[in-house]
Image (cartoon, coloured by chain):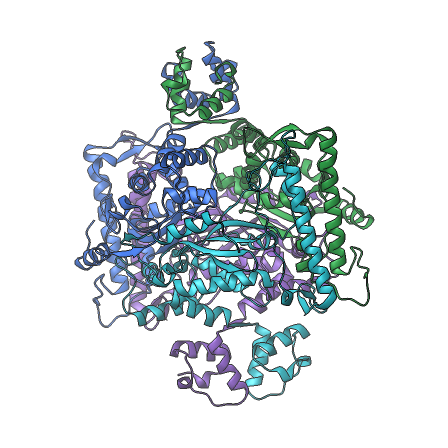
Chain colours: A blue, B cyan, C green, D purple
């Protein structure tokens, strides 16, 4: 991640702002407000604004005249109860806004979360930065052989070098040709005064999907947790997980009580189907049950055994 | 509107909060934060929290590293442009949260705006306040004779008294019977120690639709304007318009530049259909056009003439 | 539920429609299309239209050129996989539309599900039917003593009679006064030719919350299941569960494979928190664990023991 | 657009389906159901399913027991009224589902319409087709000189050839390298048996933004019209307009009465701001007004004059 001097100054200016407000404040989050937290090779996340804190959840759940807090203890108990029983509306009462720089192919995954507000940098209007994502060596994974949408072993040696050369070479060539077609360089200088450039809305189609874009993304706390539950999970693609992991940290700074409940009930929790419950009941009774006595598929059986750490029962 | 001493104290406590923040602040809105602004006979609106101001719209539209403002002038121009061309996403970047007390029949209209977050006081869990909406005399309107969903002249004299007596009598009787069925009074005291009360989730069905309820309601700036465009309009029922009018004032305090653009392009503006445009074009040319030369219905014709203040052309 | 002769004829006419289509068809659902399935004392649900069937889910998940089905077996496996892993978008590809008659206080619970489309009968525009919900004797429950939003034992004898008399008397009186204020009866006849009636949008506020209203309600399959998961649950209020139970039956007729997966993974399933998993792991190992050795609250402990049918461990 | 033999057969099979249904049917839309309507060089739109027709709008608006139609005339009047007064919910009662093949950079614009359901072909799971969008010569536009997000004159001659060569060359090279990195060709054949291929979720990042993707896209009639109002407009990028134009035709086949009202009130209509109304009023009175006597910006003034065809007043 490289910021221009002007960008650094803009960020500094915001960080030095000091206003007085009657609204609730999340001090740990204020500490990193506006800061560009680096992700992948050129990406970042910046927390731009937020509304509410843990007490706002309690306040809304109680429809109270004052602030939420009775005692911290009682409040934590209520937040845990709401999380456990899937109450959704009190968590919607907090809101957060990020400025994010990310590769386009990750932006395309991200945008599938529809209950959020987005303003993306417009490549119809402006010229994109010359920045592409290139995986680091340890993330250069082969296609998984048993999971059609997963990763297998790391590719190394000569083949790794070859892949990185191809990615780098193609990204640079297509970007250079993008400038050629635009007849304009990123800094605004014209290449050939006698030519007119191709419309930006057309030239952009030549860029590769690892080109970085950026957007403002705003969502409420409930939908942020829905996002993180899916995207901080080990099934998620590494590149989006890298963002989700940093966002988990901002969650902790913002609403620490909610964060604890989220980790316990959602991230660390498991769902057990009706048929799966029958298996667990028998195991608790000490019965020796095999998959043949159940209606579970092999895949379901193994998922269940892994969830409860019964590795000797994997088949 | 009557607040208990405890409620007044809760509000006072919040109003005396003073925190430091790096976030943008809307000073005029801070001035009325938490205050219960009275509406109708027992209702109110309180602004509980907000996120962003006019500069946040500009900042998101530009996906900028610093705050939105270049010069106030330029910013106002951009906001007006965005409003005129129905750009929606930058206005979604600001958020506001209200605490509202309102009659149930109005709450039922209100909730039809789905893009908002709501926590309502639960009558499954708690006992509702003994407060009902009774229209003031000047709002006691007869059914309109030419608009099936509108109001006509004010009802007065003996009939007005009769209507108010019926409304008051029925609200009080049903509320008293609600307490009888609950075997419990609003203050929590038990009526007959030897009886058990009917479940709250059942007893509430005896209340009339003018009983007051309350909720926390949160929405973004775009959807707030969508709400106000419909509900501050003269076609809206008076009782919901009373709320919308106060909310218009909070809009002005929060995002004054956006408010100006909203009043010009939305509230004060008009839509002209393709066929309507042909009529206006001819009128500008000085041609004397009658409805028979158009494809407009009588209703459309009159709506068009009223929009452009051509009252002599009404038919 | 009483339908007028005209309503019965309207329904009959629709049921005798016979069109040819290339779209997929759900034969079991066609069998009950338009039929008014009775619920509570005056309510009903009618399936008015639908789009897609089980194969549509598979078709969308595969983004296929033909219809979804490869083999019924493979399709069922895919649908179960999608359900188990919380894939949401393929289930959004099916849509259903109901016509529902229900008491207003239930309509107010129902509408909190925002991702649906609604057209409600307008009491600003029309006069509501003279129909109120009165619980049957076995549903006349006392307030629960240990769950602030639940029901306890059934109220019986003299008190039951008293409650029903109050509910019936208040509903009838307020409805009669509604007519008096309107100066018009439900059949459209004027009461006193010399008076004008109160505006409908005002008079309706005198009605009690057990008055029946009706609406068209349309949603996609994913959000229908979200609704049913909450509202067919034993925590839901009996009166809304009565609707959800009938809708479960329409779900089974419409998408039988999805219905099976839904019952297994959602309705019959359980969530186990991170801390809860530790307890279950120890129980499987045959360890004798008590609540003191865990971080669970008493409530959480009991919920966990009930989920796995360990009633002797309840505390 | 080239379909494989298998795809053609899949489509044929669906088109020859013939089911009996009680649901309303839109015969003109049935005629083109499943057909791949070609767009741009390799794209298409296929209507896969639909629910409702013009009468469904009327039926929902009236919350009726029978089908919507009273008389075609009355129904058309009601639909026009609903459209003119921005009633939204009755139009949400109809639903349509498309299968669409489109370039990725257009898919990124498209997806910003959030109130729709989407299943996209997964490049984590599968290999994308070797198809890229290359503009035809008449669409090879230069950047506009006065509108930062628009097109100017067509680029021709040598420069046009150069642009097309760059686009074609880069798309082919990056696709070939995509196959090399995957160590697999589109047809599934392995390139080098001794190597493992890069994970699909990574390799895809090398593709250019004009690569075609495909998805199932479903929305209700209201949101379809919102989409078309923006995307069939002359401000929209040509490439997305090409899709919107074909969809306008499917709208006409599906709900012809609604289509007429949409063209009159939305597509052909104009909005006039409060300040703009003052100008039009004066023009109708025959007054000779200049921009200096108004609060309009030059841009607003010109937009207003163009809307009413007053080209001699442009400044």
- Report the front residue among D300 and A30: A30
Q: Residue at x 68, y 46 (%)?
A: B174
**Residue placed most toward the observer, B115 or D227:** B115
Please give left or right for residue D292 compared with residue C196 in the image.
left
Name the one closer to the observer, D40 or C92: C92
| B175 to D189, vertically: above or below | below
Residue B89 image point, x, y percent: 41, 58
| Residue C189 horizontal/vertical position (percent) | 82, 60
- Based on the displayed image, in which of its 4 quarters is residue D222 positioned? bottom right
Q: Is residue B110 visible?
A: yes
For the image shown, how many numbered marks are present on the structure?
A: 0
| Left or right of residue C229, residue B219 in this image | left
Residue at 20% x, 54% y is: A3
* Residue at 60 percent of width and 40 percent of height: B185
Which quadrant does the C terminus of chain A fall into? Answer: top left
Q: Position of residue D218 (x, y in %)?
A: 53, 49
- Give percent across and percent down for residue A55: 38, 43
The vertical placement of B203 against D101, above or below, is: above
Left or right of residue A194: residue B124: right
Residue C49 makes an appearance in the image = no
Q: Nearer the viewer, residue A138 or C238?
A: C238
């Amino acid at each position: 991640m490289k910021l221009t001097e002007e960008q650094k100054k803009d960020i500094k200016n915001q960080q030095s702002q000091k206003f007085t407000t009657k609204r609730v404040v999340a001090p740990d989050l204020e500490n990193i407000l506006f800061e560009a937290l680096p992700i992948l090779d050129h990406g970042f996340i910046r927390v731009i604004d937020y509304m509410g804190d843990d007490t706002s959840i309690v306040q809304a759940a109680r429809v109270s005249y004052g602030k939420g807090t009775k005692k911290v203890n009682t409040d934590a108990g209520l937040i845990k109860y709401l999380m456990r029983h899937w109450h959704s509306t009190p968590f919607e009462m907090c809101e957060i806004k990020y400025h994010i720089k990310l590769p386009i192919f990750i932006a395309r995954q991200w945008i599938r979360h529809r209950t959020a507000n987005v303003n993306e940098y417009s490549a119809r209007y402006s010229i994109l930065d010359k920045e592409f994502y290139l995986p680091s060596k340890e993330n250069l994974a082969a296609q998984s052989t048993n999971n059609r949408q997963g990763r297998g072993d790391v590719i190394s040696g000569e083949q790794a070098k070859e892949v990185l050369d191809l990615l780098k070479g193609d990204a640079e060539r297509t970007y250079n040709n993008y400038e050629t077609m635009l007849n304009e360089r990123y800094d605004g200088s014209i290449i050939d005064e006698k030519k007119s450039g191709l419309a930006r809305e057309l030239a952009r189609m030549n860029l590769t999907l690892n080109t970085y874009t950026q957007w403002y993304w705003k969502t409420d706390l409930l939908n942020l947790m829905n996002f993180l539950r899916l995207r901080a999970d080990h099934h998620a693609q590494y590149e989006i997980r890298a963002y989700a992991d940093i966002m988990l940290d901002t969650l902790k700074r913002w609403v620490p009580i909610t964060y604890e409940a989220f980790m316990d009930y959602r991230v660390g929790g498991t769902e057990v189907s009706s048929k799966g419950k029958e298996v667990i009941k028998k195991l608790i009774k000490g019965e020796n049950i095999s998959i043949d006595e159940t209606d579970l598929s092999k895949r379901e059986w193994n998922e269940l055994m892994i969830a409860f750490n019964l590795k000797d029962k994997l088949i």
